[in-house]
Image (cartoon, rainbow, N blue to C red):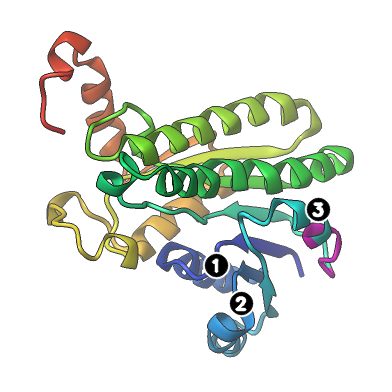
Amino acid sequence: MKQVLILGATSDIAKALAHEYGREGYGLMLAAREAKKRLSITCHDLEIRYGVTAKAIEFDAVDFANHEAFYRNLTEVPAIVVCVFGYLGDQSLAIRDFEESRKILETNYLGAVSILNVIANDFESRKDGSIIGISSVAGDRGRQSNYLYGSAKAGFSAYLSGLRNRLYGSQVHVMTVKPGFIFTKMTENMNLPPALTAQPDQVAKDIVRAGRSQRDVLYTRWFWRYIMLIICLIPESIFKRLKL
């Protein structure tokens, strides 16, 4: 049974992804902080529903020193790795408190680079595997409302682009996912426009489908590609005057 490793498996998108991959017959390795406490019931449910294996594994995105040991100690080599973890943070706090800025940058960028460096090196030597990184449309252009989170995601998108270029010759697939608004615990206090906001299971279906067809970059939902194209085409002399 091929295995999928989901890093940051307690998020709503990660759980929706676990169901999609379970439905397709993949074994599941769900990695997160306090995984056994927070994911044991989820794993049991997945095993019963889909007849697959599902394991909860301890993982801390910002415990950089232990990332290599974490991967080395996995009982099976995953065929697919999905890097889902992230931290939206508090932009208004972060502009005054560097510790909040650091947490946003370390979680969304450094943590992803640290663990994916380890995995990419292994996949490259095996000449096999698929890496899926959940970035964000927030990384396409900096806006005053969330530019610290956005800058970390911009860096992550650039990292994934370079990784894709590096690993292409090794037959390792790398996909960048750029979700727009999603109804999740992370956004539950935000006033999101319903017409532009997806459910986690819609996003998960898009990701699994795009991964299967080996897409390079996925905007989900699809209309975000065109929304962000328009936003990116606005001249800077006008853009800087907007309240975004």
**What is the CA distance from the residue labelled 2 to the residue labelled 1?**
8 Å
| Precedes in sequence: disc 2 or disc 1 | 1
**What is the CA distance from the residue labelled 2 to the residue labelled 3?**
18 Å
- Is residue 196 in view? yes
Q: Indicate the quadrant containing the N terminus: top left, top right, bottom left or bottom right.
A: bottom right
Whether residues under marks 2 and 1 lie with C-beta atoms below 8 angstroms apart, the answer is yes
Tag 2 secondary structure = helix
Whether residues under marks 1 and 3 lie with C-beta atoms below 8 angstroms apart, the answer is no
Query: Local crowd at mark 2 within 10 Å, few (<14), some, or many (≥20)?
Result: some
Amino acid type of disc 1? Ala
Residue located at (11% from left, 31% from top): 243
Residue located at (75% from left, 54% from top): 67
Vertical position of residue 215 compared to residue 9: above or below = above
The magenta segment is 70-75
Residue positioned most to the right? 125
Q: Kindly identify which residue carries mark 1.
A: 9
Q: Kindly identify which residue carries mark 2.
A: 35
| Precedes in sequence: disc 2 or disc 3 | 2
